[in-house]
Image (cartoon, rainbow, N blue to C red):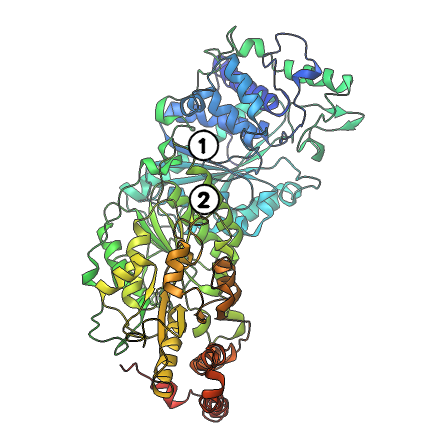
Amino acid sequence: MSDGASARTTLPAEELDALDAHWRAANYLAVGQIYLMRNPLLREPLRPEHIKPRLLGHWGTSPGLNLVHTHLNRVIKARDLDALCVWGPGHGGPAVLANSWLEGSYSEVYPDVPRDASGMERLFRQFSFPGGVPSHVAPETPGSIHEGGELGYSLAHAYGAALDNPGLLVTCVIGDGEAETGPLAASWHANKFLDPVHDGAVLPVLHLNGYKIANPTVLSRLPQDELDALLRGYGHDPLHVTGDDPAEVHRAMAAAMDQALDRIAGIQAAAREQGVTRRPRWPVIVLRTPKGWTGPAEVDGSPVEGTWRAHQVPLSGVRDDPGHLAQLEAWLRSYRPEELFDDLGRPRPRVLERVPEGRRRLGATPHANGGLLTRDLPIAPLERFAVPVDKPGTDRHEPTRVLGALLEQVMADTATRRDFRLVGPDETASNRLEAVYEASGKAWQERTLDTDEHLDRHGRVMEVLSEHLCQGWLEGYLLTGRHGLFSCYEAFVHIVDSMVNQHIKWLKTSRDLPWRPPVPSLNYLLTSHVWRQDHNGFSHQDPGFVDHVLNKSPDVVRVYLPPDANTLLSVADHVLRSRDHVNVVVAGKQPCFDWLSLDQARAHCARGAGVWEWAGTEKHAGEPDVVLACAGDVPTQEVLAAVTLLRAELPDLAVRVVNVVDLARLMPHEEHPHGMTDAEYDALFTPDKPVIFAYHGYPWLIHRLAYRRAGHAHLHVRGYKEMGTTTTPFDMVVRNDLDRYRLVMDVIDRVPGLAVKAAVVRQRMEDARTRHHAYIREYGTDLPEVADWRWTD
């Protein structure tokens, strides 16, 4: 160890022996999980039938993770710390499972895997085995909040967990392969947002074992002075632990841990007791140990330990190659299991000597099982924020601005308990949510200038121009039991597609684990949407995140398209109270007509989809001639504008207007819990009448959701079809054939008998589109008949 850490912690021989015993036990259990299905304690010579038929798992990172876990145990117990660890290396499952079994937390949540020989055998057999557990750190792993299946998000998750947890130490082990990803690189900047007064501390451990699957890693090959300059540039003071001699590494790791925690305690005391406001330089531990440390040095003449060959299964032919089998047995016996486990297979007292107890154990901390800590979010009555609606389509409001007033109150009502955060990539004010600044400023620990606005060292609004960081922060915050909302431009939320994949999978798996209570939902507010990005142009026009999300687990995902301010309030009230869901809410920030009163909005949102009787013309006809359906604010306006044209031009036509708020309502009930039965769907849309559906996003999604319905052959969907540019608002809908004139033409084309009778009307609609094209090119604004349109009964 180097870099200012000369004041080494002196480890008495007895303590060093206990730490090494625990580390060896964890290593033994990690190897056993990869290879063994019987004979877990080697009470008889190892035979091929003791070996799993398929060898799966990752050994390379495990010894380093076991070292970190062992030394975290030591400092947690010695200092009585409240601690959580985020395990970044993707497939470090063997190590984390081994340690949770050793400390007893695993057997507490899985009583069928006790801490004895029978439980050890079950632990080994179930790893990467049908009906068992994954090879990575997953929801099934006690003490985990971080899915190891995809790399790059560990440090952001760690900071999210530390926010508003002033007594919590969050250690984050970062694999050096993971450190090459974009999200992880951005996450080093999270320390500029960490408040040492109200937040906990994050201790990154950069584990440089040198290799990824088949290549060296960038950071491990940097000269130490260059790596130190990089880490100092990120605002950290590095502490180095380097070596391959276990005793020396134990001593160095203990010293680095003590020095890091002393620095953290000093930073927090200075901020909390002395009022120091200067951004601190937080410690980071750089741990260099060989990949596959203590494993086979060489296999079949090729070096393994300390190379990329140690990444997964170093000995792959154990069942068929007697030499490999003998080498595996020698490897396992090198840990001296008879010294570590008693005759019944239980860990000996010396192995557990430095393991904390109860909720202090890393596998038992409630911070890794956030539903245990969650409190209901205080949400004021919506009547305080709702807009009055005497008649539909008379007044306009900006829906997200109305929502901003509600979020301001939520921020104010959680000011002392600090369990709600709003995150977004530099867009809170742009998205009309700036009212929240009245209750909380923007988190910021760097210097401020006189021209800055709303920056606050203790703020709970998180803005950084990295969607990855926003997503990671919020996931870590939610999984540790708090609440939040992610506000983002619709087109750019795609940047976190793969991150939301992992979170949805996490929630889906967690719902099947009775020991994991529900956590607050991940809520997206997607605004600055496709239909009102006419000024920014094609690059800002993409409504496809909804398609991506609706491919995922129906138990978890929800999509809402509120058409006005009051329905947005109703939807927001619902999603902010919900648990274990990923809720996507798409709403506009531009002035939008108010269609429904608050009571009407609540009833409509509860239905998820319904007939707007006041808008249709079927009252005396018994059944409609055509259904005009809509989902989204701009499509709703275009449908209602089309209805006014149909009333004037074809007064005898019976038109039904259906608005859809909850997109999953279109799915069959068997495929989504919000889906309609066939009888409900047919009653709403009819089984045999033409349905013209104006949809906010890509039209084929509606066809996919409704393809099994009886009336699908009569369904015609208009939506966004990649016809974007910088233009006027109405030209966006015209370009994509979603405009009112095209919808009228669709009705004429699809209602039997209308094509001949209404040929002149159709021609007038076509002429209106032609006039529109000429007008915007001359005047640069939309036709007065469009810009000044109002709903009339």
Q: Quadrant of residue 250?
A: top right
Q: Nearer the viewer, residue 424 or 1?
A: 424
Residue receiving disc 1 = 259
Left or right of 217 on screen, residue 460: left
Q: Residue 157 bears which disc, if any?
A: 2
**Which quarter of the figure is the C terminus placed in?**
bottom left
Using the image, determine if residue 674 lies above or below residue 307.
below
Tag 2 near tag 1, CB within 8 Å: no
- Amino acid type of disc 2? His
Counting residues from the N terminus, which is met first, the one under dot 2 or under dot 1?
A: 2
Q: Secondary structure at mark 1?
A: helix
> Would you call the spot at circle 1 few (<14 residues within 10 Å), some (14-19), or many (20 or more)?
many
Residue pictured at 66% horizontal, 27% vertical? 55
Where's residue 669, x and y in %? 42, 51
Q: Is residue 198 left or right of residue 634?
A: left
Provide residue 285's location: percent of width, then percent of height: 51, 36
Where in the figure is residue 758, as x and y percent of width and height?
45, 87
In this view, the residue in front, 675 or 75, is 675
Q: Nearer the viewer, residue 112 or 654?
A: 654
Badge 2 crowding class, 10 Å Cα cut-off, few under 14, some 14 to 19, many 20 or more, is many
Quadrant location, the N terminus: top right
